[in-house]
Image (cartoon, rainbow, N blue to C red):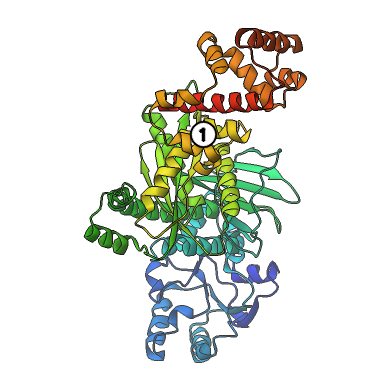
């Protein structure tokens, strides 16, 4: 069944499109529809197409050259030309007159569309009229692929390219589109909305009515949203979100969506490969800075190559990946560390990050306006975000973060690095001192005066600070059951009831254990000074455990 330019106009699907010239020639059969994307577009036409153009691609060519390009279309027997008139392009007016004259000479219908109407709704409508369902999908896939491909090879930063991809996709599917990092922060969007991504409880797997290589999910809030997870080499992930605000997505929309995802992946993978090269080169230099093994001349070279500043304030942040009790330190675990590194690079942009086995180190520039409380909060949020992603992957690992002190200039970076590592070494001690057994982000300064003991590397010298009553308990408590009960008892202000609730044991069990401790050691729980010495002794035993 033939579909003509006259049928297109009479359908009134796009009442904004008006016939400028050629009312008598509207019976021409439409064989396809294309956008004039390059001056030599005639090479890619089969004949009988209706063309869309704003003449932008001809803006730089001379009028004589433009006429020659138009003459080449004569052999293609065009079914029509739809001209988008851009009011801002006054210098194209003469070329528009030349196009009108050409259409009159060749008896080609010339139609005009307003600037605010996008090409893509017109293209989809015409393709669905001209071709059967499968051919329309193939041709539309090819057309959108070519348009996204032009963005793939543009030398832009990924953030700029992502915005352009989303703008093009948004014009194709006529709905809002946004790209999010793993932490839910917006990377780019087609609108002003930069709110965090919220995954609802009704999020479910979804399969669109096309052959797809990607995993879709759908959730229902104010509008239906489609969420596509984009994996980058298994090292990082981003989420593409389409909000079905203006109209329901069609099969052709999903074809465009597939091409947009491929283009985004190409951009992220290209940037990832470049970062890998840079990381390998920077790793040795940064490691030498942190271990203070550079000569004065080497230091100057490192500062210059890494773009550092002798006057800038810095601090080191160490991210340590730990396996849970059932995890294994193997190739899979190291791969998981690589994934976490990718997530850190996405969530902690602008930082100099390098990896050494299970440890990831960030060299953080401290700004004048930044407070340490704000940094702590930011890192805690980052840790929660990545830990949730770890749980989704079921890898059985935990991310711990140690923060080093702020230092002036690069020459003291090793001091901050050592503090960050020590914070992780004594994380269990810090948890006891702070009374928070779930702390994942710690500073060495959280040890308070216990830092003095932490600097003693000989365990035998630490024993002299432990009261004799606690040493007797430690030596006879092979299961560590009594010391643990004592610690929880002191943490709960010597409340037997709260101790039993915290340890999930019967009240009488706690009473029995405390009586046993008192009988065994002679401790006086009412003596505040003795209890302070015991609390300090418990912390010292943990320090000794870490040293050993």
At x 64% / y 68%, what residue is drawn? 8
Viewport quadrant of the C terminus: top left
- x, y percentage for residue 93? 53, 90
Comparing 57 with 376, the one in front is 376
- x, y percentage for residue 470? 56, 17
At x 71% / y 38%, what residue is drawn? 202
Comparing 384 with 406, the one in front is 406
Q: Is residue 413 left or right of residue 101?
A: left
- x, y percentage for residue 442? 53, 41
Viewport quadrant of the N terminus: bottom right
Residue 253 shows in the view: no
Residue 204 figure quarter: top right
Comparing 416 with 358, the one in front is 416
Comparing 310 with 516, the one in front is 516
Residue 144 shows in the view: yes
Residue 307 figure quarter: bottom left
The residue to which callout 1 is attached is 427
């Amino acid at each position: 069944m033939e579909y003509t330019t006259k049928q297109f106009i009479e359908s009134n699907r796009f009442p904004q499109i008006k016939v400028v010239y050629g009312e008598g020639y509207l019976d021409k059969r439409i064989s396809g529809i294309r956008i004039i994307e390059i001056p030599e577009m005639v090479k890619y036409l089969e004949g009988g197409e209706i063309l869309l153009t704003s003449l932008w691609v001809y803006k730089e060519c001379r009028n004589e050259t433009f006429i020659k390009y138009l003459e080449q279309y004569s052999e293609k027997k065009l079914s029509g030309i739809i001209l988008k008139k851009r009011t801002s392009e006054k210098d194209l007016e003469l070329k528009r007159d030349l196009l009108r004259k050409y259409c009159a000479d060749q008896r080609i219908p010339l139609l005009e569309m307003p600037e605010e109407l996008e090409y893509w709704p017109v293209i989809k409508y015409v393709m669905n009229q001209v071709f059967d369902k499968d051919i329309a999908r193939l041709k539309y896939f090819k057309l959108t692929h070519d348009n996204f491909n032009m963005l793939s090879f543009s030398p832009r930063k990924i953030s700029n390219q992502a915005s352009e991809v989303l703008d093009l996709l948004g014009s194709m599917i006529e709905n809002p589109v946004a790209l999010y990092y793993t932490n839910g922060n917006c990377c780019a969007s087609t609108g002003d909305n930069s709110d965090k991504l919220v995954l609802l409880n009704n999020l479910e797997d979804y399969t669109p009515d096309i052959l797809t290589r990607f995993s879709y999910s759908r959730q229902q809030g104010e509008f239906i949203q489609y969420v596509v997870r984009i994996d980058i080499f298994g090292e990082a992930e981003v989420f593409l979100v389409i909000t079905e605000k203006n109209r329901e997505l069609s099969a052709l929309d999903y074809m465009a969506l597939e091409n947009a995802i491929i283009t985004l992946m190409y951009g992220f993978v290209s940037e990832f490969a470049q970062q890998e090269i840079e990381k390998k080169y920077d790793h040795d230099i940064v490691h030498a800075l942190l271990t203070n093994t550079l000569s004065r001349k080497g230091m100057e070279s490192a500062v210059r190559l890494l773009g550092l500043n002798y006057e800038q304030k810095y601090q080191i942040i160490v991210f340590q990946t730990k396996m849970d009790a059932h995890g294994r330190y193997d190739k899979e675990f190291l791969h998981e560390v690589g994934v976490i590194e990718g997530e850190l690079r996405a969530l902690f942009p602008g930082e100099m990050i390098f990896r050494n086995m299970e440890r990831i180190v960030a060299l953080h520039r401290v700004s004048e306006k930044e407070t340490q409380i704000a940094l702590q909060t930011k890192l805690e949020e980052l840790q929660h975000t990545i830990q949730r992603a770890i749980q989704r992957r079921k890898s059985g690992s935990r991310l711990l973060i140690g923060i080093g002190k702020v230092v002036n200039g690069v020459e003291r970076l090793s001091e901050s690095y050592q503090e960050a590592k020590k914070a992780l070494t004594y994380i269990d001690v810090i948890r006891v001192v702070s009374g928070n057994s779930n702390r994942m982000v710690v500073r060495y300064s959280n040890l308070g005066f216990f830092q003095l003991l932490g600097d003693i590397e000989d365990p035998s010298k630490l024993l002299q600070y432990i009261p004799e009553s606690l040493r007797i308990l430690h030596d006879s408590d092979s299961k560590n059951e009594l010391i643990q009960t004592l610690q929880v008892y002191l943490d709960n202000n010597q409340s037997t009831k709260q101790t039993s609730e915290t340890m999930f044991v019967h009240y009488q069990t706690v009473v029995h254990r405390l009586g046993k401790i008192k009988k065994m050691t002679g401790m006086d729980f009412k003596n505040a000074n003795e209890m302070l010495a015991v609390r300090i002794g418990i912390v010292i035993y943990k320090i000794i455990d870490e040293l050993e």
